[in-house]
Image (cartoon, rainbow, N blue to C red):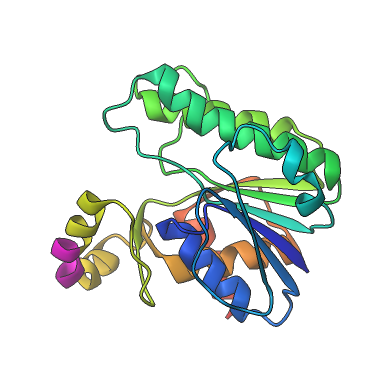
Amino acid sequence: MNVVIFGATGMVGQGVLRECLLDPDVTLVRTVGRKPTGISNAKLRESTSQDLWNYAGLEPDLTGFDACFFCLGVSSAGMNEADYERVTYGITLAAAETLSRLNPAMTFIYVSGAHTDSSERGRAMWARVKGKTENALLRLPFKAAYMFRPGVIEPVHGVKSKTGLYRAFYVVLTPVLPVLRWAFPNFILTTEEIGQAMLAVAKNGAPKPVLEVRDIRAIVSRRA
């Protein structure tokens, strides 16, 4: 299986990349982002671009893939709706439209978020934009598309967020995560679990297109 990962230097993307490189069923991993990952691996090929709204120059690198794991995203904190939509919706659809044309048999998996608003009419700005993005992806002519909606994400195996505020948050949260996992089993996932679930869905599909935390955890449990 050949896979392409967008946002492989982010926290979720790092975890997904790790699982892809470890999986014997994955032959080739292509990463796309503004910066290289800094990882050396025989399976890994990297494409960098500062213009993630335009993929015309990268099309030769984006052909021949079975799955895309789209982990690229930004926090909505401090952003107005137009700017957040330009990044969250604009970059995602620019990539997805290109990939669906070049790889019609591809499975596309998008990292969204818990409480995303599929109606696109709710009060939370970020949730409306994520919902609009999900809905647009589900209309594209992929073999299949799945929306992953994690809640709290626990970084493991050395994965770190690029955002200083998030890193500080995880330092504070780490001692109580075992208790939170016990109390709220359907709210917390590790980066490892997300990566493993994405690979399982890319290989075998899933019973529905929108997957909440409990659905993602169930996929990982069946995989084990």
Question: Looking at the picture, does residue 144 appear above or below residue 67?
Answer: above
Question: Looking at the picture, does residue 86 appear above or below residue 13?
Answer: above
SS majority, magenta: helix
Residue 172: in magenta span: yes
User: Which x, y percent locates residue 150?
Assistant: 44, 52
Which residue: 61% across, 78% down?
A: 41
In this rendered view, identify the residue nearer to me: 171 or 180.
171
User: Which x, y percent locates residue 181?
Assistant: 29, 67
Assign the C terminus to one quadrant of the image: bottom right
Assign the N terminus to one quadrant of the image: bottom right
In this rendered view, identify the residue nearer to me: 20 or 109.
20
Residue 143 is at least partly visible in this image: yes
Left or right of 173: which side holds 46? right
Residue range highlighted in magenta:
171-176
Q: Residue 162: which quarter of the image?
A: bottom left
User: Which x, y percent locates residue 168?
Assistant: 17, 57
Question: Looking at the picture, does residue 55 appear above or below residue 208?
Answer: above
Residue 27: in magenta span: no
Residue 217 is at least partly visible in this image: no
Which residue: 17% across, 65% down?
A: 171
Which residue: 60% across, 62% down?
A: 198
Left or right of 103: which side holds 135? left
In this rendered view, identify the residue nearer to me: 101 or 222.
101
Total marks placed: 0
Left or right of 85: which side holds 94? right
Left or right of 128: which side holds 158? left
User: Which x, y percent locates residue 182?
Assistant: 27, 69
In this rendered view, identify the residue nearer to me: 23 or 115.
23
